Image (cartoon, rainbow, N blue to C red):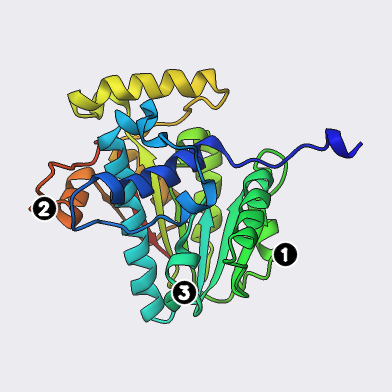
Amino acid sequence: MEQNKKIAEPDNTAVRTALWRALHRQVDAEPHILEDEVGLQLIAPPDGWQERPDMKFTKRLRASIIARARFIEDLIIEQSQQGISQYVILGAGLDTFAQRRPDIASKLHIYEIDQPDTQIWKQQRLTELGFGIPEGLHFVSVNFETSSWWEELLKAGFDISKPAVVACTGVTLYLTKEAISSTLRQIAMLAPGSTLAMTFYLPIELLDEEDQPMQEIAEKGARAAGTPFVSFFAPDEILAMAREAGFKDAKTISTKDMEQYYFTNRTDNLLPASGEVFLLAAT
């Protein structure tokens, strides 16, 4: 019986994202936008992983991933300094904020929400590598198709009377508009002073021309993997959904904004792909 037991494995997208974060430090010029090699330690890929096609030919996608991770990190540090003590990561994957920034994380209750396999594997690796699981780090395992992330979050000790920061990156692409709207409505009901940072993807016709072929390849690969891309939105549609959900304050952060924040005066021509837009909304 024991031999047939399924071994937990992390989601492929979570692995790729973590490796992109590590690759940034290895191949891009300083100053690095984000210093994150903890995910690389967790994954421990075979030698030559940097030569994988999804690593070698995806510089602009890598830049987008780095920028969004840095944007979220800046946000949670700023909000923590203002007294926010709860941080929820919807679709956490192999997020490493708690390991890399214990100075901030020790002041927070961090709720990482994701599929059970990824979380079981991650906790095993954190223990094996000696990182351990800090008291304020809560793993909230959810099968999004069959259970409520909100109910599981409450069971994990989340305090609805206190404001929180909610981050959700790289997730809406795989959800229906109805599921996204439902999630937005739930988050809009958080305590006043809460902040949401959520990424959305533009339809292919709104991408820069140089990014369109890569998007077509990504869509084809996602379909083949059984995780097809479902939802794309123009910026005005994103804002309309946020308003309908009940957010009192909402704006979008574009790729051009990200370039201004993190990519000015670089020597390596590193620039993010044009497909991703942030919704930044407050309750």
Question: Which residue carries the number 2 mark?
Answer: 264
Question: Which residue carries the number 3 mark?
Answer: 102
In the foreground, 270 or 83: 270
Please state which amino acid type lies under the numbered disc 1.
Lys
Callout 3: SS: helix
Among the 4 quarters of the image, the one containing residue 59: top left
Looking at the rendering, in which quadrant would you find the N terminus?
top right
Residue 239 can be seen, yes or no:
no
Among the 4 quarters of the image, the one containing residue 209: top left
Q: Residues within 10 Å of mark 1 (few under 14, many from 20)?
A: few
Q: Name the side, left or right, on which 127 lies relative to 224.
A: right
Please state which amino acid type lies under the numbered disc 2.
Thr
**Discs 1/2, front:** 2
Give me the residue at 38% from left, 46% from top: 199
Q: Is residue 107 above or below residue 205?
A: below
Callout 1: SS: helix
**Discs 1/3, front:** 3
Q: Residues within 10 Å of mark 3 (few under 14, many from 20)?
A: few
Label located before the other in sequence (1 or 2):
1
Question: Which residue carries the number 1 mark?
Answer: 155
**CA–CA distance in space, label 1 to label 3:** 24 Å
User: Percent x, y for residue 7?
Assistant: 73, 40
In the foreground, 153 or 176: 153
Disc marking residue 18:
none
User: Percent x, y for residue 236?
Assistant: 29, 41
Q: How many marks?
A: 3
Label located before the other in sequence (1 or 3):
3
Looking at the rendering, in which quadrant would you find the C terminus?
bottom left
Residue reaching furthest to the front: 47
